[in-house]
Image (spheres, rainbow, N blue to C red):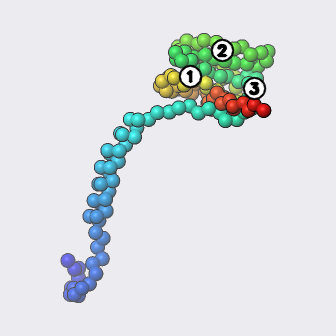
């Protein structure tokens, strides 16, 4: 339909955009993503990587390490900054974990780092629980600890 009083010339190109093919393509893509997305997330599996570097790093003073064993129990592993002695992993009940982490991080101003080491066989929801408790306790950075992959020995 032409606007104004001018007559439409024969063979003139219409200046309208035809959006029907674009809508068709978008609907096809939507259907494809609706079908494929659940299939991708259903088969998600993760394996924890092993470190490739041959050098081990010693624990620094005042570092806090949170361990989760194969049964899902929490262990806090710290080096006491006052004495400089390694205290070793100590079992912590789930309900006491946030309080102990809050106490450890309450006086820290700069390094609110928690090193996390978890057994590869536990459910990831247990790791998520630990991360949420740590965040509520004031932890700002979480570092993952990986087992060192041992290089095969070459015999001469």
Left or right: where does residue 11 sit relative to residue 65? left
Closest to the observer: 130 or 136? 130
Closest to the observer: 52 or 59? 52
Q: Give whichever of discs 3 and 2 has the lower sequence position.
A: 3
Res 41 label? none
Q: Assign the N terminus to one quadrant of the image.
A: bottom left
Q: Which residue is mark 2?
A: 89
The CA span between labels 3 and 2 is 16 Å
Q: Which residue is mark 1?
A: 119
Q: Quadrant of residue 18?
A: bottom left
**x then y, percent, for residue 66:** 62, 21
**x then y, percent, for residue 2:** 22, 80
At 54% across and 18% down in the image, what residue appears?
70
Q: Quadrant of residue 67?
A: top right
The CA span between labels 2 and 1 is 14 Å
Closest to the observer: 9 or 63? 63
Q: Assign the C terminus to one quadrant of the image.
A: top right
Q: Give whichever of discs 3 and 1 has the lower sequence position.
A: 3
At 73% across and 19% down in the image, what residue appears?
79
At 30% across and 70% down in the image, what residue appears?
17
**x then y, percent, for residue 123:** 48, 24
Q: Which residue is mark 3?
A: 58
Left or right: where does residue 82 sit relative to residue 143? right
Left or right: where does residue 51 sit relative to residue 48? right
């Amino acid at each position: 339909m032409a606007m104004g009083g001018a007559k439409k010339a024969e063979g003139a190109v219409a200046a309208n955009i035809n959006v029907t093919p674009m809508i068709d393509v978008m609907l096809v893509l939507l259907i494809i993503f609706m079908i494929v997305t659940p299939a991708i997330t259903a088969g998600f599996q993760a394996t924890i990587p092993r470190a490739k570097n041959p050098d081990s790093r010693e624990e620094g003073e005042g570092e806090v390490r949170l361990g989760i064993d194969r049964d899902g129990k929490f262990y806090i592993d710290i080096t006491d900054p006052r004495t400089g002695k390694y205290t070793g992993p100590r079992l912590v009940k789930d309900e006491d974990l946030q309080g102990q982490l809050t106490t450890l991080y309450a006086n820290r101003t700069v390094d609110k780092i928690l090193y996390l080491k978890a057994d590869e066989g536990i459910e990831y929801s247990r790791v998520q629980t630990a991360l949420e408790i740590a965040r509520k306790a004031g932890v700002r950075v979480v570092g993952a600890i990986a087992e060192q992959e041992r290089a095969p020995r070459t015999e001469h």
